[in-house]
Image (cartoon, rainbow, N blue to C red):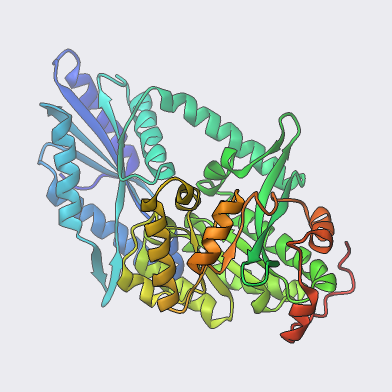
């Protein structure tokens, strides 16, 4: 059976469901979505993207049974209906067979295009008995797989409520961006050799009209997996550059780190967007660092490396966040043009509890220094932890022991008054100068 278009697929699915009524067997609707198709379109052109979608459909068809239904539902999404299955394990076998047939990449015009699919499953008749509900449940499972970084998820009833909550939260976040309810707080990073602050990490906070100030953990996972990810990144970059330009008047050369999410990392215009923000506020590349989690890079190591090299070529500092949680290889780490590794706080906080975490932290520090990469310890909350990190040769640290994240004006006071504050004299000795900033930049 050929690959059907959306209307043909849904009409045929409706007929098949009517024929299955009362048969007593299980059937599954599988949705498969091509990961990072928008990035592929942006980098290689929509012609390549369209051909990739067509080729993926052809390959999926070869992996299915003749009686299985296959349709292209739009974009990079395919629908498959596998009737009369003996059990759920057969659906997993079908997914495995499809992935095997696809391989890691597809050659188009002498270009190896990486291809990976995510899957959502909904079962007839257990989850739904009509086309609309079955399709909706499979879409919720696919969205959950995307949000949770998984490969394949089976629909669960709780996903209906999660889906409604997520949709409502995205609508609230869109208003938050429009109505300036979001702001950046900054947490100092202290250089352990001097005991003074040299750089900051920008962290978003949401002043919700009904719930007060919300930390990022309560809304960022939803935002990063929505269409707002790119607009949010543009907003955060511009605000961070504005505020570091203001800070640079009093604290010459101070650096700020901005976090990039996994779904933004592969955007084709990301490097240009970052450079535009620096140009608007006349901030030199030496005062900006970009933080990317290790797990985000490992979603597509080849594309991540390409993007990070473009940033490095532009003179922008790069930092791997939450290092130790993403299973990157030593060979891959050697290729990365990074300046800094941030050791995940779970390892740092564990250094006071036993030798195992200390061994892990020591090995990361040694590895990084052998590659001429600096090390930042996250989550420092006790003096004993700080003393041990100094002895271990760690370069920088951040955590509640020094300061909690704070808005810029409070940060300015802290940088002047705290024992961990900005060492202006040390900065001047290095020759750092505050950049000339546009005359309309205000405090």
Residue 171 coordinates in the image, percent (x, y): 63, 37
Residue at 70%, 52% in the rendered image: 403
State whether residue 91 appears in this view.
yes
Horizontal side of residue 209 vs 199, given as left or right: right
Residue 262, percent across and down? Answer: 47, 56
Q: Is residue 191 left or right of residue 150?
A: right
Residue 233 percent coordinates (x, y): 61, 58
Q: Quadrant of the N terminus?
A: top left
- Relative to 370, say whether 27 is above or below: above
Where is 301 relative to 101, above or below?
below
Q: Position of residue 414 (x, y in %)?
A: 80, 57
Question: Number of numbered discs present?
Answer: 0
Picture layout, residue 436 above or below residue 70: below
In the depicted view, which residue is nearer to us: 107 or 239? 239
Q: Name the image quarter holding the C terminus.
A: bottom right
Snapshot quadrant of residue 109: bottom left
The residue lying toward the viewer, choosing from 4 and 234, is 234
Q: Residue at x 53, y 71 (%)?
A: 318
Which residue lies most toward the top here? 22
- Front-lying residue, 400 or 128: 400
Identify which residue is drawn at 23% across, 23% down. Answer: 17
- Looking at the image, which residue is at 42% across and 24% down? 158
Q: Nearer the viewer, residue 76 or 147?
A: 147
User: Is there any visible trace of residue 45 in the rendered image?
Assistant: no
């Amino acid at each position: 059976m050929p690959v059907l278009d959306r209307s043909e697929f849904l009409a045929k699915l409706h007929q098949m469901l009517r024929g299955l009524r009362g048969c007593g067997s299980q059937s599954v609707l599988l949705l498969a979505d091509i990961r990072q198709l928008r990035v592929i379109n942006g980098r290689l052109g929509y012609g390549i993207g369209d051909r990739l979608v067509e080729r993926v459909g052809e390959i999926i068809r070869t992996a299915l049974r003749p009686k299985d239904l296959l349709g292209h539902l739009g974009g990079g999404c395919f629908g498959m209906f596998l009737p009369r299955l003996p059990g759920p394990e057969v659906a997993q076998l079908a997914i495995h067979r499809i992935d095997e047939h696809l391989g890691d990449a597809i050659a188009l015009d002498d270009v190896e295009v990486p291809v990976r699919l995510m899957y959502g499953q909904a079962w007839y008749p257990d989850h739904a008995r009509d086309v609309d509900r079955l399709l909706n449940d499979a879409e919720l499972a696919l969205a959950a797989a995307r949000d949770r970084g998984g490969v394949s998820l089976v629909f669960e009833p709780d996903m209906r409520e999660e889906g409604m909550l997520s949709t409502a939260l995205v609508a609230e976040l869109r208003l938050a961006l429009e109505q300036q309810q979001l702001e950046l707080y900054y947490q100092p990073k202290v250089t352990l050799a001097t005991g003074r602050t040299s750089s900051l990490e920008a962290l978003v906070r949401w002043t919700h009209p009904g719930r007060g100030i919300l930390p990022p953990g309560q809304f960022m996972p939803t935002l990063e997996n929505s269409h707002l990810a790119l607009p949010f990144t543009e907003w955060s970059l511009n605000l961070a550059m504005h505020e570091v330009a203001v800070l640079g008047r009093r604290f010459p050369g101070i650096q700020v780190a901005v976090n990039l999410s996994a779904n933004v990392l592969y955007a084709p215009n990301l490097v240009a967007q970052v450079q535009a923000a620096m140009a608007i506020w006349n901030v030199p590349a030496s005062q900006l660092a970009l933080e990317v989690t290790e797990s985000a890079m490992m979603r597509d190591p080849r594309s991540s490396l390409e993007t990070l090299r473009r940033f490095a070529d532009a003179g922008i500092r790069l930092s791997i966040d939450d290092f130790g949680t993403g299973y990157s290889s030593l060979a891959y780490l050697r290729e990365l043009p990074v300046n800094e590794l941030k050791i995940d706080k779970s390892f740092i906080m564990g250094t006071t509890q036993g030798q195992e975490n200390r061994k892990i932290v020591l090995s990361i520090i040694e590895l990084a220094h052998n590659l001429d990469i600096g090390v930042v310890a996250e989550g420092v909350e006790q003096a004993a932890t700080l003393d041990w990190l100094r002895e271990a040769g760690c370069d920088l640290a951040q955590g509640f022991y020094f300061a909690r994240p704070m808005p810029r004006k409070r940060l300015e006071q802290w940088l002047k008054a705290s024992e961990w504050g900005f060492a202006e004299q040390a900065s001047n000795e290095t020759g750092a100068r505050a950049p000339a900033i546009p005359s309309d930049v205000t405090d």
